Amino acid sequence: MTELSPAEKKKERKLIVIWSVTFLVLFPFLVVLGYMMRLNQAERIHLGMDTFYTLLTLHGLGMAGILFSISFAALWYLIATRYARLKTGIGYFVYALIVIGFSLLAFATLVGKFGAGWYVLYPLPFKGTFWAPWATGLACASLLTMGVAWLVGIIHVVSNLAREYGGFTNLLGWQYFKKGGVKRELPPVVMITTISTVPGVIAFLTGAVMLVMYVLQIFEPTLNYDPLLMKNMVMFFGHTLVNITLYCCTGWVYCLLPEFTGRPWKSDKIVVLSWNATFIFILFAYFHHLYMDFAQPVALQYAGQFISYLSAVPATAVTLFGLLAQLYHSKIKWSAVPLSFLAGGAGWAIGGFAAVVDSTIAVNTVLHNTTWVPAHFHTYMLMGVVFFIFGFIFYISHTKEELDKDILGRVGLWIFAISGHSFIATFYRGGLRSIPRRYSDYSGIPIEHVHQTGMFLAFMAVIFITIIFVALVIIYTALFKKFAKRRHALVMEPAAA
Amino acid sequence: MIYFPTLLFSIQAYSATTAFIAGTLIVATVLFIIFTSSKGSDDKLAEKHKVYHVRDRYFLILTLAIIVGLIISLRFLPYEQYQGKPAEEVTVVAMQWAWKMAPGISNATPEAFTGESEITLPANKLIRFVVTSQDVNHGFGIYSPEGLLIAQTQAMPQYKNELEHKFTEPGDYHILCMEYCGMPHAYMIGTIHVK
């Protein structure tokens, strides 16, 4: 691609700064919701069951939404400034739709009391609800708005990349297996962007169809869909969204870490093969959410376990080993960026392993819908994705020299890692002690020891989340000092350029 | 023979704990090695090759672990065709927010079916629970008297899930809802008296 002019670069920088600040504002707000839920489960405050489930819904959908959005925005920025020309106007359009979608979701939940959980499991939004039908409609509209934003953004990015690199199959790296060698190297971030987002298109379209079916039922209550089909649809949508969020993050790790280690990280046959396999695994791993639906064909249950196990191969043997090969004996200075990337890799490995354990059908029998599940995805998202995002935001807000001098950010990240893993340990422990998830409180459980254990672990979680807030204050101080310093120019040279 | 104090964890939870702790320790060890290696050699390419050499072995070990893991774990599936011939059958219908249970297979519609939230069943006999729902999705989770989740299946409208379980110890077992089903989800309780 032709080099961007300084004015064009500035435009792209402004967009990613706006994205980053939006994320940094919304993220702690959603953490507060989680804090309140754990306080309620610890019986330290009394939210009421309706409020609890309302907060649960906003926390889950909101987090999944903003984490994917910022992850995609980060890839957008890297691609627009380095690999293919993108229209900044479309970037702002995507941003505006996400903000509108999030606002509608907040209204549907906080005002309309919509509380069907992130997965709006059919037919729950239509039976025995404590919220009005308009809130269901608004929640569907909010998710459709975000879905349209993501679809527009993804299609724009992938189509422009395909034009730049001579066709879609070249984005998948298939040219590495053709005779005659590779004419133009494929940067891993370009391939990962494609492989992470294209399954997203399929998932978002599936989710959109499902949401339209919901909207139709609001207007025609006699409609009755197959609940098993609907569950397959929502799990495919939800699992894929969360899964690709992390894969998007690995894209910028491949792209940015070599700037700190001085070692190239390039595409080759193994990297291409592993990411193409990941493409398939992303689409079919979701079956492991339906093990306890005994009506689901057994072949799909087998497939769920088989694919979940196999997905560990490219993730660990290629990407995580690649990360280690970048860092081992690299004489790297552990500034906030590589520190975040390594911590994120560790969170991904631990959270992923917890998922593989739970994707074992025989084990899922006693862990399904216990707090083991939030343990897994909090490790994956909070200690994986959020670390990668922090690493990226440190990268775009600091120069290389500033990163080397920074102590505050590093201290904050260490506290965040320790308190974050400790908080999540309360979920793991709860899962192993059969504490059910999505319980507003445990006082209705007739087994006293389950009630007491659930309450105690929730209180421990509250303590650790309090420390997470301390960590966030420190990290935010480090970040916002730099954002404020450059608020007029908004031109921040890449950290390691 | 290894002694498992069943009061604390189920055998599956023990397996999960062992595997998870082992996995976390491996990650921690690798992190330690990476951190302490940062002041190493200048030959960056050689260092990279060392890691990739380890990767080849890791790949073999991982492949082996996956094959062994699949062979062992897929022998213990909860689906009814793997359990044997049941001695008794129980119809279970979930509703917002209660359990209806009665002995035998009922031909009534879920809405018309009448049953109680408590039932008495024999110990050491294979019981088949035929589970459905009359409204939304619920989760039929059986908790031992000590408070361990020992078996579960989803209760889904329009579908019947067949769960087979043998209660080896007499006592009062509780049913907790394992799928979010509306506001009082955490208060949807049933009881199985095993004698």
Image: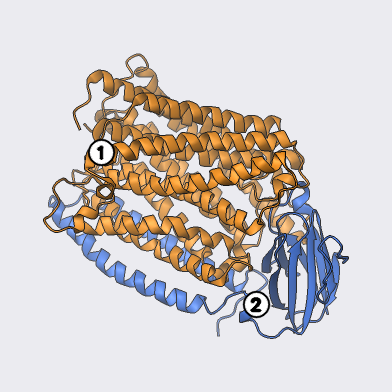
Chain colours: A orange, B blue
Q: Nearer the viewer, mark 1 or mark 2?
A: 1
Q: In the rendered structure, which amino acid carries the disc numbered 1? A: Arg
Residue for badge 1: A163
Q: Position of residue B62 (x, y in %)?
A: 35, 69
Q: Is residue A322 above or below residue A205?
A: below
Give percent across and percent down for residue A228: 63, 59
**Secondary structure found at label 1:** helix
Chain letter of the residue carrying label 1: A
Label 1: few (<14), some or many (≥20) within 10 Å?
Answer: few
Residue at image location 27% in from the left, 47% down from the top:
A171
- Between B31 and A216, which is closer to the camera in this rendering? A216
CA gap between label 1 and label 2 equals: 53 Å
The amino acid sitting under disc 2 is Glu
Q: Secondary structure at mark 2?
A: helix
Where A280 falls versus A89 (above or below)? Answer: below
Residue A267 in sight:
yes
Residue highlighted by disc 2: B80
